[in-house]
Image (cartoon, helix red, strand yellow):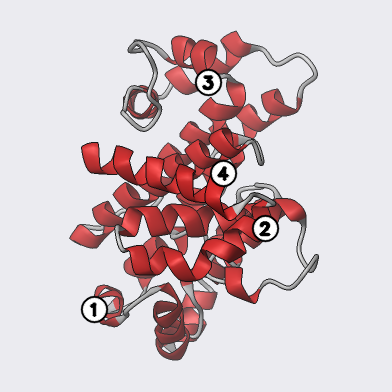
Amino acid sequence: MTTADQLLQVELPPRPAVLSALTEQMQSDEPDLHRVSELVSSDVGLAAAVIKMVNSPYFGLSRQVASVQQAVTFLGLAEVFGIVTGALLRRSFVSNDPLMEQLWDASAARGALMRRFAHELHVLAPDRAYTCGLFENAGMALLLVHAPGYAHTVVQAGDGIALMERERVRYGVDHAMLGQALMRTWGLPEELALAVRQHHGLLQLQGDEMPLLTRQLIALSTMANAALSGVQTQWEPVRGAVALVLEMPPQQLQQHFEGCRSHLNRA
């Protein structure tokens, strides 16, 4: 069996039971927030990870929280659902390779920036942007665990598009495909899964070929990744396309981008 065949037959991590229970509460007309807190708090490690993330600079709360109940109160159920999902995602892939920790740190930063941009620009629900940012490179985590020599493949690639090309040649599948498959397995919205699949394809989008939410998520991802790169030449070629998708004057968009860059430089 080839490496590609093995990867395509890899069993994706199943949807965690706590995520299914939280989804039921999310879909309820009257969510039981106390029950939500109990579900998360019953797993000490998960609760600690959630509280740590909520108290991080990424979320910028004016005061520290000491419990999951407080996190739900201050941020709301949708935001906490996204944070829990991210913590469970990180837990699902275990590797001693330093690249794994780098992947999750970058994912947390990207998700937080996409959340911030979604909030500031009023284009979509911040929790959806956050979740999409977390899953964007989840396929890379799966490849790092199951694909021989994957860390070396990452080092060789110059950018995300080149990396996916190398992945398809060497392993028969790319990280975006795997990320989409994982989101579907975990029962997350198809618009988000499609955005993960196409997160490097902003400049190839044509008209209304995708749902508006998907296009907006791809635009926010492009903007966040450019901000995190710290390379102005990565932002200039895509700024117009991002502004077009988000239906925002380029000058106004630039102000938000520069404000974000200033914040990152101070951090």
Cβ–Cβ below 8 Å for labels 1 and 4?
A: no
Decide which of 188, 233 is in the foreground and name it.
233
- Upstream in the sequence, badge 1 or badge 3? 3
Location of mark 3 (residue):
39
- The kind of secondary structure element at disc 2 is helix
- Residue at the location (50% across, 13% down)? 74
Label 2 crowding class (10 Å Cα cut-off): few <14, some 14-19, many 20+? some
- The x, y position of residue 31, in whole percent, is 70, 16
Quadrant into which the C terminus falls: top left
> CA separation, marks 1 and 4?
30 Å
Question: Is residue 232 shown left or right of residue 121?
Answer: left
The kind of residue tagged 1 is His
Q: Quadrant of residue 142?
A: bottom left
Cβ–Cβ below 8 Å for labels 2 and 3?
A: no
- The x, y position of residue 206, in whole percent, is 73, 73
- Residue at the location (71% across, 50% down)? 213
Location of mark 1 (residue):
152
- The kind of secondary structure element at disc 4 is helix
- Upstream in the sequence, badge 1 or badge 4? 4
Residue 9 visible at all: yes
Nearer the observer, disc 1 or disc 4? Answer: 4
- Residue at the location (43% across, 63% down)? 235
- The x, y position of residue 52, in whole percent, is 31, 26
Location of mark 2 (residue):
245
Location of mark 4 (residue):
129
Nearer the observer, disc 1 or disc 3? Answer: 1
- The kind of secondary structure element at disc 1 is helix
The kind of residue tagged 2 is Val
